[in-house]
Image (tube, rainbow, N blue to C red):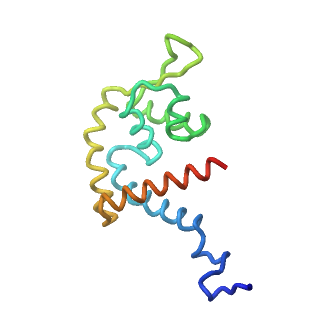
Amino acid sequence: MTSTATDGDDLLALENQVCFALAVASRSVLALYRPILEPLGLTHPQYLVMLALWGQSPRSVKELGAALQLDPATLSPLLKRLESSGFVSRRRSSVDERVLDITLTDAGRSLRTQAEVIPPRIVSELGMSVDELARLRETLHAVIDAATAS
């Protein structure tokens, strides 16, 4: 069976690529976050770090990397910028000096209150229901699990 670019089943048609849809969706959604995060002094990657720390602080760099699925080389500059902004502190663990603990500062903790407006604003910007977004998130987690299992 041969496939043509016009039959809708072309395996190499750009519009049929999951990777293309994910890349465009990711860029588009992150673009919505940019003006919302800017007044807080955060980039989207920094916001993700803060979300992880608002869930649990202190955390080691290793724990943060695992939670965010980021390698230390990517995470380290984010943490340095968050520290210079006054949102986190980086300290050697008193239990094991090889471990670097990341702790929210008072400013980092108070930033959480300001950030509580972000999820509803994103839901509003997307014009999708919370249920639709929850189903999408579940599907994306299944994709992540499948991609990382291979």
Q: Residue furthest front?
A: 1
Q: How many marks?
A: 0
Q: Residue furthest top?
A: 95
Left or right of residue 124, residue 12 in this image? right
Q: Position of residue 37 (x, y in %)?
A: 36, 49
Q: At 44% from the left edge and 48% from the top edge, which residue is drawn?
A: 44
- Using the image as rendered, state which of residue 76 and residue 139 is in the foreground: 139
Q: Position of residue 124 (x, y in %)?
A: 28, 61
* Residue 77: quarter of image: top right
Q: At 70% from the left edge and 84% from the top edge, which residue is drawn?
A: 3
Q: At 27% from the left edge and 33% from the top edge, which residue is drawn?
A: 110
- Using the image as rendered, state which of residue 71 and residue 43 is in the foreground: 71
Q: Position of residue 10 (x, y in %)?
A: 65, 80
The correct choice, above or below, for 29 with respect to 85 in the image is below
Left or right of residue 92, residue 52 in this image? left
- Specify the quadrant that holds the N terminus: bottom right
Q: At 38% from the left edge and 55% from the top edge, which residue is drawn?
A: 33
The correct choice, above or below, for 108 with respect to 94 in the image is below
Left or right of residue 97, residue 111 in this image? left
* Residue 130: quarter of image: bottom left
- Using the image as rendered, state which of residue 14 and residue 42 is in the foreground: 14
Left or right of residue 51, residue 67 in this image? right
Q: Residue furthest right?
A: 1
